Amino acid sequence: MKFTRLSVGVIGALALLGAACGSDSNSSASTGDTAAPTTEATATSAGTATSGGGGGGAFSSIFLPKCTGNAVFDQANDGAKEAATELSVTNADFVGPASCADSTGQLEFVTNAVTQGVNAIMISNNAGDQIDPAIKAAKDAGITVVAWDSPIPSGEGEDLFVAQVDFDETGTVMADMALEILGDAGGELAILSATPDAANQNAWIKSFNEVLKDPKYANLKVVDTVYGNDDADESYNQALSLIDKHPNLKLIMAPTTVGIAAASKAMQDEGLCEKVKVSGLGLPAEMQAYTESGCAPQFALWSFKDLGYLAFYAAHAISTGALKAEEGAKFTAGRMGDYTIEKDPTRSKGLRIVMGPFTKYDKTNVAG
Ligand code: RAM
């Protein structure tokens, strides 16, 4: 049976959504307490969030992904919950817009958190600099703001960015995968990204284009950059448009777990995997079939669970006063060990810690 392009995309979207819904997203609501937040170590009065589990110590926070319904954000939230349990504090409220396409959808969650007087906001920013006024209001209210996965580009109002990997390294990793897949002959490639305002993808694309200037990659030609808004259906259709528009396209590079899986499915459904390969940043569980079939021979990622765990430890430490968000400050994040805060060299302003490492996947290790 041959599905239409749209219906296959819809099925793909539902499958991804179903996978995401399978995990516990701990979305129980905070009580809306309006007690003033404080950054003191003894800040026990402000938090009354009532999410289940996590020991129950009063530390109220929100864990705000770009949008809900993405398996990697559920994994990050699992890590945050693990940290909350170890720290004997209440889990963060896992809240966010239903669609990543809604680039300003996160603003109301930040604003509500300020009204509720939470101790900390942990955010993967999907709104570029448009988030600045809301984040600044949170900061002015004494709330700890830790970005994870996707930073506040200006650094304004953000205490710390928990970087999954070094953002400049991402460009090199993607360029090397493209070169290995296409070989020295190279060819045309297109980038299929998430949302146009996603700070992480935009930084990675910038770095990728920078790295490609090295003569080593001279035969790799980026012919287009398109956005699937981290929506499986939209990404699927964007991948199909790319192959219609660029008949000589040899590779789709998707620095998004949603985009890479959707593009792989599109190429597989069209029987094009021999002609157009897919690579980028992908979740092994979503990519295994495409990697084993040769549609997506190589991709990379890091642990989202660890990222959420580390973000929660950092936010808790800063909020309680155990850690000062300043260059050179050190702290220990449970099972993940020691970290030192540094200036973020990939932004003009802002502090970061870098988690790492990248794991590269191919058919030898994708099954785990
Ligand atoms: C998607 C999201 C996320 C990004 C990954 C690689 O799941 O856009 O922010 O880190 O892809």
Image (cartoon, grey):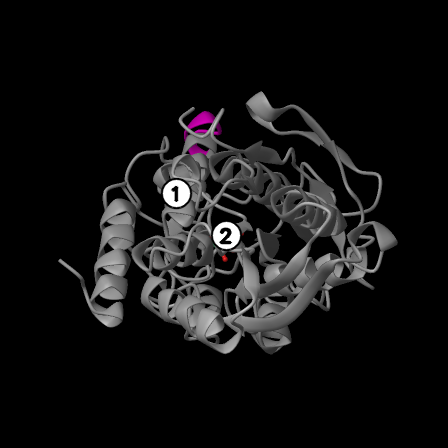
- Measuring from the top left, give residue 184's x and y in whole percent: 73, 47
Which structural element holds mark 1? Answer: helix
Q: Amino acid at mark 1?
A: Tyr
- Magenta stretch: give its range: 84-90
Q: Residue furthest left?
A: 1
Measure how far apart labels 2 and 1 are at the Cα level.
9 Å
Residue 255 drawn in magenta: no
- Measuring from the top left, give residue 340's x and y in whole percent: 77, 35
Rendered image quadrant of residue 230: bottom left
Quadrant of image for the N terminus: bottom left
Q: Residues within 10 Å of mark 1 (few under 14, many from 20)?
A: many
| Circle on res. 290 | 1
Residue 87 drawn in magenta: yes
Residue lying at 51% horizontally and 71% vertically, measured from the top left: 247
Q: Earlier in the sequence, mark 2 or mark 1?
A: 2
Residue lying at 17% horizontally and 61% vertically, measured from the top left: 2
Residue lying at 35% horizontally and 39% vertically, measured from the top left: 289
Q: Residues within 10 Å of mark 2 (few under 14, many from 20)?
A: many
Q: Amino acid at mark 2?
A: Val
Residue bearing mark 2? 278
Specify whether 320 is left or right of 277.
Answer: right
Specify whether 8 is left or right of 146.
Answer: left
- Residue 55 seen in render: yes
Depth check: 282 or 180 in front? 180
- Measuring from the top left, give residue 322's x and y in whole percent: 67, 36
